[in-house]
Image (cartoon, grey):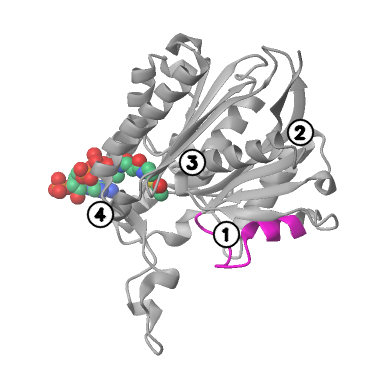
Amino acid sequence: MANPLVRVAGTGSCLPERRLTNAELAQMVDTTEDWILMRTGIRERRIAAAGEFTSDLAVRAGQVALEAAGVEPNDLDLILVATTTPDLVFPATATMVQRKLGAHYRQAPAFDIQAVCAGFVYAVTIAEKFILSGSCSRVLVIGAETFSRIVDWKDRSTCILFGDGAGAAVLTAAQGEEGSSGILSTHIYADGSYRDLLRVSGGISTGLQPGEDPRVSGVGFVQMRGNEVYKQAVKSMSAAIDDTLIMNGLERHHIDWLVPHQANIRIIESIAKRLEVGMEQVVVTVDRHGNTSAASVPLALDEAVRDGRIKRGDKVLLVAFGGGFTWGSVLIRW
Ligand code: ACO
């Protein structure tokens, strides 16, 4: 019997032109190329040009995903953008993406999701629910960031980690038998008690009083207790993977591809070890992209789809972790 399911009809991505290498960073802060590479696995990251915004990267990734899916912008029922670095506090970046795509004539809803590095996994989860409820048939989900705009370029412990980019997927409603391609399950979690380990203070909650100069208030940059975040990232993503396997009645060896959040190669290796998959089954982009927050998982997914590593029928496990903390996973039969 055919059941409703949600398919990934196409993926896309976009990276800004400019590469920032470890050697360049070593000229900017007290660090070395080797320290960055050994502790993080990052060799370079991309940086958005002046005047290039999150919505610009999101639109380009979205266009590539729409083309791959064979879906026209005006056929979309919903546009979701996961981002921590919106163009403006409001309106939502998703509404700017809608206009720039030329998808505004049907007036499909468009809104942003804020779950930091877990944003894309959150957005896919929300899109899946909209489709399974029968409200939508074609949803564009984008993870897009210009994280370089919110790092303190004088703080060597954080500025070396992040980069800019966008990744996208078009999700569509389908009917399928047991064993058909589609999303098998989604899992999202949050624990707000970790607020102070990873945050950007600023915006509405700065407590800035009339007449105070925001430029000297020291707000608005990423602050992270990296070591503690690291431990929680491994623990939480491993727990999400366990839940996913249990819910689907699967064993570890059933997973063909792990597409993890790209924060640090050591975190990725720890998760792969726990899942008992070899690194040849793990999609890694952190060496070239750094941590692109909500864009990291869809950027990695698109790369492995386009180069042919991920094939029809493969079980693909997306897993992410970010500020909040927020975390989650999505299991897809490709
Ligand atoms: N160059 C040289 N030395 C440095 C640098 C640098 N760029 N940065 C820090 N150090 C120093 C520190 O000052 C410290 O020196 P000390 O021992 O004299 O005090 C030493 O290196 C070790 O610092 P640690 O913070 O313990 O280094 P660690 O091995 O933990 O690596 C890192 C730091 C890379 C940040 C790591 O902890 C990490 O990747 N954490 C997880 C980040 C993450 O997962 N984020 C996910 C979510 S991101 C989001 O949601 C936005």
Asked if the stretch drawn in magenta spans residue 96, the answer is yes
Viewer can see residue 289:
yes
Q: Name the residue under label 4.
A: 30
Name which of mark 2 and mark 1 comes first in the sequence. Answer: 1
Q: Name the residue under label 3.
A: 289
Viewer can see residue 32:
no
Given the image, on which type of amino acid does mark 3 rest? Answer: His
Asked if the stretch drawn in magenta spans residue 23, the answer is no
Q: Which of marks 2 and 4 is in front?
A: 2
Q: Report the span colored magenta.
A: 84-99
Given the image, on which type of amino acid does mark 1 rest? Answer: Ala
Distance, label 1 to label 3, CA atoms, is 15 Å
Ligand 1 is in which quadrant of the figure?
top left
Q: Which residue is drawn at 50% across and 10% down?
A: 254
Q: In which quarter of the image is residue 209?
A: bottom left
Distance, label 2 to label 4, CA atoms, is 43 Å
In terms of secondary structure, where does tag 1 sit? loop
Q: Name the residue under label 2.
A: 68
Distance, label 2 to label 1, CA atoms, is 26 Å
69 shown above or below 118: above
Along the horizontal axis of the image, is 253 left or right of 79?
left
